[in-house]
Image (cartoon, rainbow, N blue to C red):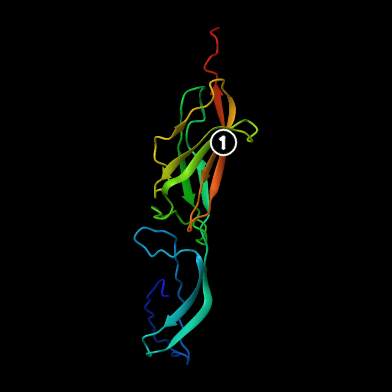
Amino acid sequence: TNVATVSTSLVFTATSGGCPTACSVPFQVVWRAGRAGALTIPPGVYDVRLTTTITRGVELVSLSGLTITAEGTTTTYTGATSGLGGTALALNASVVDLDRGIGAGNGIITPDANLGGPGMVTFALYDSTNTTLVAGPVSATLLSSGVTVTGSSLTPPAAGGSFRMRTSYAGNAFYNASSDLDVITVAASNTPPS
């Protein structure tokens, strides 16, 4: 099954020494998972078939010549880190595609069409030891730009305290899951006046 076709033009130029018997020009093909307006190749192992129009019927098939892996992600909680017991905390997060395989220093290309979707990010509030669920989980839609849709919230206990917010990105066929853990400080709602 043909999953993708990439065309390239090779231009040969004469040199003082002439062209050797076997002229070859290397070229590189780069797939980036889920780029809007670009070719989308899901992770997997593929055969590569190279053909030329110079001589009809000439081709080279490299079995398992191309391996595409899911890209890594980094999830960051960007919502409220303090609040009042019994009062809803505003929840937000961002997910960054790490562009695995691309050289250091290259910028992130957005939007990533396959990065987002409904229920891709969840928020859950745990106790200070990060073992007991206190509130949530709450799911949020992640946009292709890598940020959650605003409006999600959860309500911490009225007694307040120190909590841990677990923010998780579910991942999908194109991107690996990732998570973040943050300290949330909540004041008690029934503190007497002084």
**Which percent across, then down, holds residue 163?**
58, 30
Residue identifier under label 1 = 182
Query: Which of the pair 15/136 is nearer the observer?
Result: 136
**Which percent across, then down, holds residue 114?**
42, 55
Tell me the residue at 51%/42% (across/down): 76
The quadrant in which the N terminus is found is: bottom left
The quadrant in which the C terminus is found is: top right
- The extreme bottom residue here reads 21
- The extreme left residue here reads 37
Query: Which of the pair 108/69 is nearer the observer?
Result: 69
Against 17, is 70 above or below?
A: above
**Which percent across, then down, holds residue 79?**
47, 34
Against 126, is 180 above or below?
A: below
Count every numbered label the image shows and give the total.
1
Tell me the residue at 64%/35% (across/down): 131
Crowdedness near tag 1: few (<14), some (14–19) or many (≥20) residues, C-alpha within 10 Å: some
Question: Is residue 97 toward the left or the right of residue 182 in the image?
Answer: left
The answer to whether residue 146 of the structure is visible from this angle is no
Tell me the residue at 52%/57% (across/down): 104
Tell me the residue at 54%/24% (across/down): 157
The answer to whether residue 122 of the structure is visible from this angle is yes
Q: Amino acid at mark 1?
A: Asp
Question: Is residue 15 toward the left or the right of residue 73 in the image?
Answer: left
**Which percent across, then down, holds residue 185?**
56, 26
Query: Which secondary structure, mark 1?
Result: strand
